[in-house]
Image: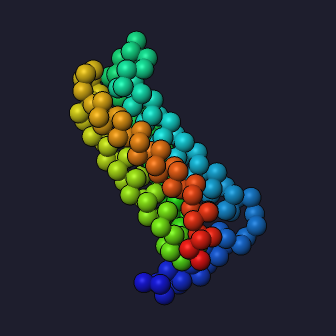
Amino acid sequence: MESALAQLEQSGLATWIRESGVLYGYPLILFLHTLGLSTVVGLSSAIDLRVLGVARAIPLASLQKTFSLIWAGLALTAATGTLLFIADATKHASNPAFYVKLVFVVTAVVTLARMRTRVCGAEQRGTLLAAASLGSWFAALSAGRLMAYVSEFVS
C-alpha cells in the first residue's frame, strides 16, 4: 500500500501540484477546495439551522433549490481534495486526522442526503438529522484543520 502511495505521490501530476510554484497550481487547487467546502457547509448549515427553528418565516421547501449548489460544491471539493491528497499521499495517508475528517465528511453527506428526502417539505421532522449534520460538519472541518498539526506528532 505504501509503495502505491509513493508512486502516486511521484506521478507527474502530483509533482506539478506540489512543486510548480505557479498560482494556478497548488494555491488555486486549495482555493477551489475551500470554495467548494464553504459552499457545501454553508448551505447545509443554513438548511440545518432552518430545520432547528431559525428563520421560521423561510419556507423549508424553498431551500430545496440550494441542493443543486450543494452537490456542485461537493463535486468541486471531492475533485480538488483528491488532487491535494495525491500531492502528499504518504503524508496524508499516515495522518489519523485525515481519516477522522473523511469519516465525518461521509457522515455529513449521508445526513444531508437523508435531510433532502425526509425533511424538506415536512416542517416538524428532522431536528436530530439537522443536529447530526451540524456536528458532523464541525468535526470534519476541525479534523481537516488539525491535519497540519497532527502530522507533526505522527512523523
- The location of residue 90, given as percent across then percent down, is 54, 77
Picture quadrant where residue 18 is located? bottom right
In the displayed structure, 86 sits above or below 69; it is: below
Whether residue 8 is visible here, answered yes or no, is no
In the displayed structure, 142 sits above or below 147; it is: above
- The N terminus appears in which quarter of the rendering? bottom left
Question: Which is more toward the observer, 76 or 141?
Answer: 141
Please tell me which residue is depicted at 40% across the width and 46% down the height of the picture.
136
Residue at the limit of the structure toward the bottom, as seen here: 3
- The location of residue 146, given as percent across then percent down, is 57, 58
Question: Which is more toward the observer, 11 or 148?
Answer: 148
- The location of residue 59, given as percent across then percent down, is 36, 17
Residue at the limit of the structure toward the top, as seen here: 57
Please tell me which residue is depicted at 36% across the width and 47% down the height of the picture.
109
Please tell me which residue is depicted at 43% across the width and 60% down the height of the picture.
100
In the displayed structure, 125 sits above or below 116; it is: above
Picture quadrant where residue 15 is located? bottom right
Residue at the limit of the structure toward the front, as seen here: 153
Q: Looking at the image, how many numbered discs can be counted on the residues?
A: 0
- The location of residue 131, given as percent across then percent down, is 36, 35
Coloration of the structure image: rainbow
- The C terminus appears in which quarter of the rendering? bottom right
